Image (tube, rainbow, N blue to C red):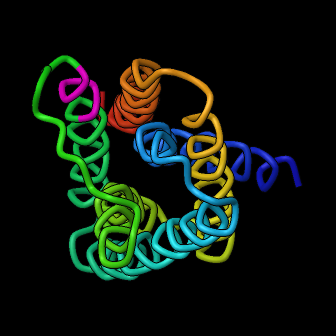
Amino acid sequence: MSEMVSEVITLIIMAFALGMDAFSVGLGMGMYKLRLRKIFNIGITIGLFHVWMPLVGLFAGKFLSEKFGVFASFIGGLLLIVLGGQMVWSTLKKGDEKVITPMGFGVLLFALSVSLDSFSVGLTLGIYGAKTVMVILCFGIVATILTWAGLLLGRKVQSWIGTYSEALGGAILLAFGIKLLTAFW
């Protein structure tokens, strides 16, 4: 029982780290003064992408773990380190931000861009044999809530907070990657 609780807590922390980019981009999108109905729809869309992308990653990861075993576990840890490092590094670069409008096709691009990292983490979790239903529920629910929070908060605060939240999410993924690789030392 305590093993399952531990896994759920770990998944929620990872989901929170992955959802921070949706939160940070949502802060910027919230500056558009969106209607509450639009905010609701964007949050649901992001949540669905955070279910679909790790699901595909999980299946790919399970396939890789069966074929490559320990080597695949090592690669999974490296993926988290690279992903977390990239998130932190992107916050240090200034002036490269692209604006996607939260309307029509822009919502799908927004959802895809903030959920791509969920595929990589899903791949890693598939390699480690995580429980599929728990992963997609945690990732989807947390991403939806963080997106809503970012969009609503974006209406109220300045956009500088977004950069720091993405750096925090990257640092958490980086720490999990290092934790997974310590098993090989």
Asked if residue 46 is positioned above or below residue 79 in the image, the reply reads below
> Quadrant of the rendered structure where residue 92 is?
top left
Q: Can you see residue 9?
A: yes
Rendered-image quadrant of the N terminus: bottom right
Viewer-nearest residue: 35 or 173: 35
| x and y percentages locating residue 50 in the rendered image | 49, 67
Residue at screen point 19% across, 24% down: 89
- Is the magenta region chiefly helix, strand or loop? helix
| x and y percentages locating residue 75 in the rendered image | 21, 52
> Quadrant of the rendered structure where residue 40 is?
bottom right
Viewer-nearest residue: 97 or 3: 97
Classify residue 84 as left or right of residue 137: left
Asked if residue 139 is positioned above or below residue 158 in the image, the reply reads below
Viewer-nearest residue: 81 or 185: 81
Residue at screen point 51% across, 44% down: 30
Residue at screen point 77% across, 50% down: 3
Please check the rendered image and state whether residue 100 is part of the magenta-colored stretch, yes or no. no
Q: How many numbered marks, from 0 up?
A: 0
List the single residue furthest toward the right.
Answer: 1
Residue at screen point 21% across, 57% down: 71
Please check the rendered image and state whether residue 89 is part of the magenta-colored stretch, yes or no. yes
| x and y percentages locating residue 72 in the rendered image | 25, 61
> Quadrant of the rendered structure where residue 85 is?
top left
Rendered-image quadrant of the C terminus: top left
| x and y percentages locating residue 78 in the rendered image | 23, 42
Classify residue 100 as left or right of residue 173: left
Asked if residue 88 is positioned above or below residue 84 in the image, the reply reads above
Question: What segment is highlighted magenta in the picture?
Answer: 87-91
Q: Can you see residue 127?
A: no
